[in-house]
Image: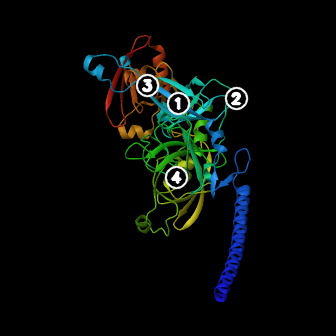
Amino acid sequence: MKKNIKNLVLTFVIGMLGGLVAFGIASTFDKDIEKEENHLDLKKNNNVRFANHNSTTIVNGGIDFTEIAPQATNAVVHVKTQYQSDYNPYAFLFGGKSDDMPALEASGSGVIISQDGYIVTNNHVVEKATELKVILNDKRSYAAKIIGRDPATDLALLKIEEEGLSILEFGNSDELKVGEWVLAIGNPFNLTSTVTAGIVSAKARSISILDKRYAIESFIQTDAAVNPGNSGGALINTDGRLIGINTAIASSTGAFAGYSFAVPVSIVKKVISDLIEYGTVQRALLGIQVTNLTTELAEEHDIDNLEGVYVAELTKDGAAEEAGLLVGDVILKIEEVIINEVPELLEKIGQYRPGDNIIVTVKRAGKIESITVILHNQTGGTDILTTDRIDVLGAVFEDITDTDKENLELENGVKVVEIGEGKFKSAGVKEGYIITSINDTPVYQVEDVKKIINKIRGGVYIEGIYPDGKTSYYAFGLK
């Protein structure tokens, strides 16, 4: 009996001691958690801030987006378009007109960048639109006008008549880091004001979807879910600032399959600024063909490492040739920006205008040299080019280059670089078409097209050629 009592007392004492030890461990653990939480708060307050300078919050070790998401969605709009199909089975079978077909509908997204109604979106969202409507997050609806489009970057600028709108401020995509959190905001599948989160998976990514002359592909790649309808929407950072325009997804099904791509805001700012100020994008050209360095290429040309991009070809009388760059040079930097991939070079040059001076750092025969280059425009000069739009034709034109003439064996011509509403669209003229004559009169420059069209009071007969060498003819009447 005494032995049993003794065992019970011993068990009780051991249990009490165990409980005290457990309590002490738990208290210490709680203090460690408290210290860790304070540590997270300290990091949060010092390093991560919203656009309104309120500090972020941490939830279960992750960043809480509940404060910036509502602010940003007010600046993201739903873009709804109507357009005519390029293929009309009724016209084919019964001889009807394409205008007889009911209009098709499509939708995308856009981002308000000014309080007086400028909105940036993707070119592919609006390029075929015959009617255009913008719906704000608060459900107000407006007719929108296309100010300008840039197929080379897949960007477009719209305008609605309103004041005091919520906007997204521009961030700095050059400072964006792989692994950084981002939000994608748009209207996938007509689900308005949808917000998804992810991280930056890669930068300066080329996916070969912009089959346009002077195309600039240097996308921000993210794993934020983006689907049809997100095009033209916002990619923002944890400061609530715009760092990209969502443009494309990598998918075999047409739906999100893990990766999406956005035009960096460094390009967006330049394109939009040009469209507002000049009516057309001022394309700065370095005048080179470059390729990424590989081990094989480096060994072939006795290059000691794989830093930079290799100059494979120079445009005759181009900016680079005039400045003294040589085939075989390895470009290491544009200004102070390190270049290791071709898309990085395209993105950086795309931020400049013709006539700008830039410092190009190259490695030549093992030595580092800095060369000042004056960038050219599309016609080989250094002047700013103004819009060459002829409203009655609904098109924008540019003088063809010497390269165009050489490739197509032409002596003269004017290129159609943009098609909107007007006679050309109705007649079926496509972008890239080079007009060689109008009513049997040769055209050498855009001014010739304007003069001839202004004198015509009846029918117009146009001869020309497409970049693939196909000769085409169009006829229509002018009122």
Residues packed near mark 2 inside 10 Å, few (<14), some (14 to 19) or many (20 plus)? few
The kind of secondary structure element at disc 3 is: strand
Compared to 100, does 291 lie above or below?
below
Q: Find residue 164 and name its label.
A: 2
Q: Which colour scheme is used?
A: rainbow
3 on left or right of 149: right
- Secondary structure beneath label 2: loop
Looking at the picture, tell me which residue is in the foreground, 199 or 412. 199
Front one among 387 and 118: 118
Q: Do the residues labelled 3 and 1 touch (CB within 8 Å)?
A: no
Mark 1 and mark 2: span between their CA atoms? 19 Å
Q: Say which quarter of the image contains residue 142.
A: top right
Looking at the rendered structure, the kind of residue marked 1 is Val
Residue picked out by circle 4: 204
Marks 4 and 1, how far apart at CA: 27 Å
Residue 210 spot, x, y in % from top left: 44, 42
Judged by depth in the image, the label closer to the viewer, 4 or 1, is 1
Q: Find the distance from the CA under tag 3 to the CA under tag 4.
A: 33 Å
For disc 1, the neighbor class at 10 Å (few under 14, some 14 to 19, many from 20) is many
Tell me the residue at 39%/24% (across/down): 437
Q: Name the residue under label 3.
A: 83
Front-most of residues 408 and 76: 76
